[in-house]
Image: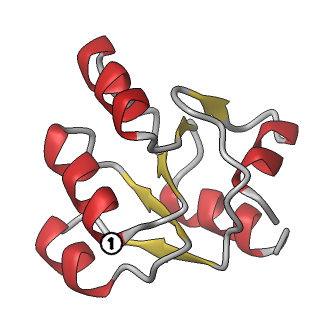
Amino acid sequence: MKVSDLNKFDEFSLLSDDKDTEITGVFCCDLLSIAMGKAPSGSAWVTVMANVNTLAVASLTDVACIILAEGTTFDSTLIDKAKEEGIAVYKTDLPIFDAALLVKNSL
């Protein structure tokens, strides 16, 4: 499954760059220091942490995309920053577990 395939789900809304990067797994974590050390490259990272440090961790770990769950979202400045850095970001109202399960079951 590629990041761009997330667009077929009504539950996900694209906030920034759509990519053809392959999603190799799903990672759920809201503690940025743990995500920094354990988020697998190529994973869809599902979190509620919607701040600039989330983008830094995504860039450092080379995740395929960020999925902001539980209705959290980035403000326009962070969306612009994500676009600038080429980081795909989606948002959803789904709980973290449900969003991760939807992606995992589609892999």
> Is 103 rendered above or below residue 25?
above
Which secondary structure lies at badge 1? helix
Residue type (three-letter) at the residue carrying disc 1:
Thr
> Is 89 rendered above or below residue 3?
above
Which quadrant of the view contains residue 94? top right
Q: Is residue 17 left or right of residue 23?
A: left
Q: Is residue 88 left or right of residue 47?
A: right
In the rendering, at what x and y percent does residue 23 appear? Answer: 67, 69
> Is 40 rendered above or below residue 96?
below
> Is 81 rendered above or below residue 28?
above
Q: Is residue 21 left or right of residue 67?
A: right
In the rendering, at what x and y percent does residue 80 appear? Answer: 34, 20
Please report the residue visible at 18 percent of the width from the left and 68 percent of the height from the top: 31
All told, the count of numbered labels is 1
Q: Nearer the viewer, residue 17 or 45?
A: 17
Please report the residue visible at 56 percent of the width from the left and 36 percent of the height from the top: 93
Q: Nearer the viewer, residue 7 or 99?
A: 7
In the rendering, at what x and y percent does residue 107 appear? Answer: 82, 75
Label 1 packing within 10 angstroms: few (<14), some (14-19), many (20+): some
Please report the residue visible at 55 percent of the width from the left and 66 percent of the height from the top: 97
**Residue situated furthest top in the rendering:** 76
The residue under label 1 is: 61
Q: Nearer the viewer, residue 29 or 64?
A: 64
Q: Is residue 107 left or right of residue 22?
A: right
Quadrant (top left, top right, bottom left, bottom right) of the N terminus = bottom right
Which quadrant of the view contains residue 72? top left
Which colouring convention does the figure follow?
A: secondary structure
In the rendering, at what x and y percent does residue 53 appear? Answer: 15, 49
